[in-house]
Amino acid sequence: MSEQPATEAPSALEQLARDQHARPVTDIAELRADVWPSDEELEQFLADWRTSRDTSLS
């Protein structure tokens, strides 16, 4: 069931999602991935990211 009027063509992003059979995330645990070898490396990455973000916002 589409939420768009029948006369409106889907956007490229909507079409890509359909083509790839994408579905909404219903459980945040689905997004979990063990990417970082240690908590310390994750914390360092987040600290660097925050610094970079804060610098670009100022």
Image (spheres, rainbow, N blue to C red):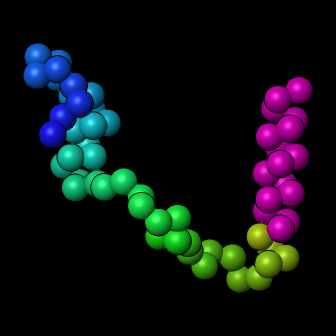
Q: Looking at the rendering, in which quadrant would you find the N terminus?
A: top left
Residue 42, relative to residue 8: is it above or below?
A: below
Residue 38, relative to residue 51: is it above or below?
A: below
**Residue at image coords 29%, 54%:** 22
Q: Magenta region, mostly helix, strand or loop?
A: helix
Residue in front for this viewpoint, 37 or 7:
7
> x, y (%) of residue 44?
85, 66
> x, y (%) of residue 8?
17, 18
> x, y (%) of residue 27?
47, 66
Residue 50 lies in the magenta stretch: yes
**Residue at image coords 81%, 32%:** 56
Residue in front for this viewpoint, 30 or 47:
30
Q: Looking at the rendering, in which quadrant would you find the C terminus?
A: top right
> x, y (%) of residue 47?
86, 57
Q: Residue furthest bottom?
A: 37
Is residue 6 visible to us here?
A: yes
Per the rendered image, the range of residues in magenta is 43-58
Tell me which corner region of the image, top left, top right, bottom left or bottom right, holds residue 3: top left
Is residue 31 visible to us here?
A: no
The count of marks equals 0
Tell me which corner region of the image, top left, top right, bottom left or bottom right, holds residue 21: bottom left
Residue 2 lies in the magenta stretch: no
**Residue at image coords 86%, 38%:** 54
Residue 19, relative to residue 13: is it above or below?
A: below
**In the image, is 15 to the left or to the right of 32?**
left
Q: Residue furthest left?
A: 6
**In the image, is 32 to the left or to the right of 1?**
right
**Residue at image coords 17%, 20%:** 5
